[in-house]
Image (cartoon, rainbow, N blue to C red):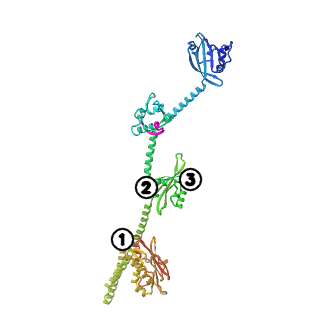
């Protein structure tokens, strides 16, 4: 049997892959592995070497005492070199001879630089994480399903307002949530996460250890192994202040929405592309659409192209030049309905002060415009009536004064006259003056009667049939004067009139046409009527002697105004016609040329 050659133990020591060294009882280095020598930067040891290990562990002040105790121990230390600091871990153990006597110590040193740096990095990350959780008011929790152990981090405990030493159970943790919805919600979500492996994210109310109610956001996610949940981990975030702020904002938004919707104004907000991003109820009601149907649209999708084009140009000008439009009177036509608005448009700025759109406000002033028109019409009627009153007063004063003066003069003549025949003549003149006064009073009374009647007496009358009736009553006059009448009025034309007034109007105008015929040609009278949306226009034309409108234009319809030297002309007929027409809300105009003829245009007011 071959014998195995014995190898020197120090030679074996040098070849050890681990950093190992042998010391004597005085701490002198006897030998070491190459790895150990490399750590400390020492050359290979020989009989001449005398390295004291205490010089290598300068920061370990009690190393000599600890070696003297002849017990195993471990210590961590640092070694500085040009490359930087190395973190080391050395284990010391007694070295025995074959008789179990301690003859020194064995050192095994490990380089733990990477582990130390990793620990420092982890510690730094944990510090960052703790700071972040503290700043964001977010903690973490973990539940071990197998061990049924629940773990909270410091921030989670702070949110619960419990001491750091508090160790919760799942039942205690669930009991922290407000009884009712919040507690039932968390209990159900936690159960589903374990059984059905469902993650969760819920906003609930937590009641802290000190009895304070706070809104929190709880998340959880299961960790599965072989299809079973072995852990549930998640976060707990204090969102109480955020929820209160959001609630306050929602309350303010609700208040603002209620206020804007309650305004008797059309309110809208447009973006830079003139698309509506907000509308109130009045705007929705006007467009006949819901807010959802309007949001995101432009005026081109709501109005005709011309209206939308004008509105867009205004919008762009307001946003580009930051020039508001205040109280501009506009007209909007939608579905055939015209609405008058008082419109204002102002630039809309974001939080950075940049224009991001415009705010529009429109006040419906259609009722005001109607009232304004009614007031204007009333003023016009009042002015007209005032003029009539002044004219009437003048007529009454002038005519009655003339009659009075005539009576007074005749009475003076009568008193001064003694001749019976002359007195009889004066009495005859007084009788004639009395008849004239009665006629004047009758005319004035008729004018008063016309202006006191109202439109309540108006009735729908067939215009052609009434014209035929009047012409029949004038047949003798027409035949005597060889006057020919052409009635072009259609059968279906009706007018709202006082029956007696309509007959009087036709009678007077046709009679005037006959009375003022030309002796140089056969009398021709043409009657036409046109019906439109505005009402009925009746035209009565003749080819008579005409009127010099440049000379008498403003006196044609005056009382007792005559323009021709005819004995039977009294100047009352046209005045009467004008009063009758205007009493029914209509009007009359005249067109005439001397020796060519005259046309009277009567405009009937068809409103009841």
The answer for how far apart the CA atoms under marks 2 and 3 are is 29 Å
Q: Is residue 56 above or below residue 515?
A: above
How many C-alpha atoms fall within 10 Å of the one at disc 1: few (<14), some, or many (≥20)?
few
Residue 231 seen: no
Residue drawn where x is 44% and y is 55% of the image: 282
Q: Position of residue 542 (x, y in %)?
A: 47, 81
User: Residue 141 location, x and y as percent?
Assistant: 48, 33
Between 46 and 10, the residue placed more toward the observer is: 10
The residues tagged by marks 1 and 3 sit, at their Cα atoms, a distance apart of 58 Å
Q: Residue at x 36, y 72 (%)?
A: 457
Q: Nearer the viewer, mark 2 or mark 3?
A: 2
Secondary element type, mark 3? helix
Nearer to me, 18 or 413: 18
- Asked whether residue 469 appears in the rendered view, the answer is yes
**Label 3 environment density (alpha carbons within 10 Å; few <14, some 14–19, many ≥20):** few
Residue 196 in magenta stretch: yes
**Mark 2 crowdedness (10 Å alpha carbons): few <14, some 14-19, many ≥20:** few
Examine the rendered structure and indicate whether residue 579 appears above or below residue 298.
Answer: below
Q: On the image, numbered disc 3 is attached to which residue?
A: 320
In the picture of the structure, the residue carrying the numbered disc 2 is 264
**Range of the magenta residues?**
193-206
């Amino acid at each position: 049997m071959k014998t195995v050659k014995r190898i020197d133990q120090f030679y074996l020591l040098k070849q050890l892959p681990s950093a190992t060294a042998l010391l004597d009882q005085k701490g002198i280095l006897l030998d070491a592995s190459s790895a150990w020598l490399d750590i400390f930067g020492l050359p290979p040891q020989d009989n001449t070497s005398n390295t004291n290990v205490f010089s290598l562990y300068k920061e370990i002040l009690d190393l000599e005492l600890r070696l003297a105790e002849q017990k195993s121990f471990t210590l961590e230390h640092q070694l500085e070199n040009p490359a930087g600091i190395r973190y080391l871990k050395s284990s010391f153990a007694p070295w025995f001879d074959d008789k179990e006597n301690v003859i020194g110590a064995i050192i095994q040193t490990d380089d733990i630089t990477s582990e130390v740096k990793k620990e420092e990095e982890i510690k730094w990350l944990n510090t960052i994480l703790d700071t972040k959780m503290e700043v964001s008011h977010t903690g973490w929790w973990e539940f071990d399903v197998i061990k049924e152990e629940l773990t909270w981090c410091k921030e989670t405990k702070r949110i619960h307002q419990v001491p750091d030493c508090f160790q919760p159970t799942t039942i205690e943790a669930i009991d922290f949530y407000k009884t009712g919805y919040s507690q039932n919600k968390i209990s159900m979500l936690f159960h589903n996460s374990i059984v059905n492996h469902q993650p969760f994210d819920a906003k609930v109310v937590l009641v802290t250890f000190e009895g304070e109610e706070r809104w929190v956001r709880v998340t959880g996610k299961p960790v599965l192994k072989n299809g079973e949940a072995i852990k549930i981990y998640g976060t707990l975030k204090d969102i109480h202040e955020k929820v209160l702020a959001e609630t306050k904002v929602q309350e303010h938004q609700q208040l603002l929405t209620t206020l804007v919707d309650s305004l008797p104004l059309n309110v809208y907000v447009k973006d830079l592309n003139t698309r509506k991003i907000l509308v109130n109820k009045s705007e929705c009601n006007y467009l006949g659409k819901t807010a959802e149907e309007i949001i995101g649209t432009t005026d081109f999708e709501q109005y005709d192209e011309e209206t939308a084009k004008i509105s867009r140009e205004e919008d762009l000008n307001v946003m580009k030049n930051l020039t508001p439009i205040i109280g501009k009177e506009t007209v909007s036509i939608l579905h055939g309905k015209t609405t008058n608005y008082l419109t204002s448009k102002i630039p809309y700025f974001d939080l950075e002060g940049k224009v991001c759109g415009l705010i529009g406000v429109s006040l419906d002033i259609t009722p005001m415009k109607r009232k304004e028109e009614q007031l204007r019409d009333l003023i016009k009627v009042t002015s007209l009536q005032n003029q009539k009153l002044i004219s009437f007063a003048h007529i009454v004063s002038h005519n009655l004064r003339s009659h009075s003066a005539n009576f007074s003069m005749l009475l003076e003549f009568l008193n001064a006259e003694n001749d019976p025949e002359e007195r009889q003549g004066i009495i005859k003149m007084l009788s004639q003056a009395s008849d004239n006064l009665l006629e004047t009073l009758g005319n004035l009374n008729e004018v008063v009667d016309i202006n006191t009647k109202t439109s309540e007496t108006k009735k729908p009358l067939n215009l052609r049939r009434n014209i035929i009736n009047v012409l029949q009553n004038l047949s003798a006059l027409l035949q005597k004067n060889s006057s020919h009448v052409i009635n072009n009025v259609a059968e279906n034309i009706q007018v709202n009139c006082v029956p007696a007034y309509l007959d009087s109007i036709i009678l007077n105008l046709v009679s005037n046409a006959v009375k003022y015929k030309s002796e140089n040609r056969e009398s021709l009278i043409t009657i036409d009527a046109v019906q439109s949306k505005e009402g009925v226009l009746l035209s009565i034309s003749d080819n008579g002697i005409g009127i010099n409108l440049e000379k008498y234009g403003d006196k044609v319809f005056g009382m007792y105004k005559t323009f021709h030297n005819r004995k039977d002309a009294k100047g009352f007929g046209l005045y009467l016609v004008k009063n009758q027409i205007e009493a029914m809300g209509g009007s009359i105009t005249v067109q005439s040329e001397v020796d060519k003829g005259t046309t009277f245009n009567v405009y009937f007011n068809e409103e009841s």
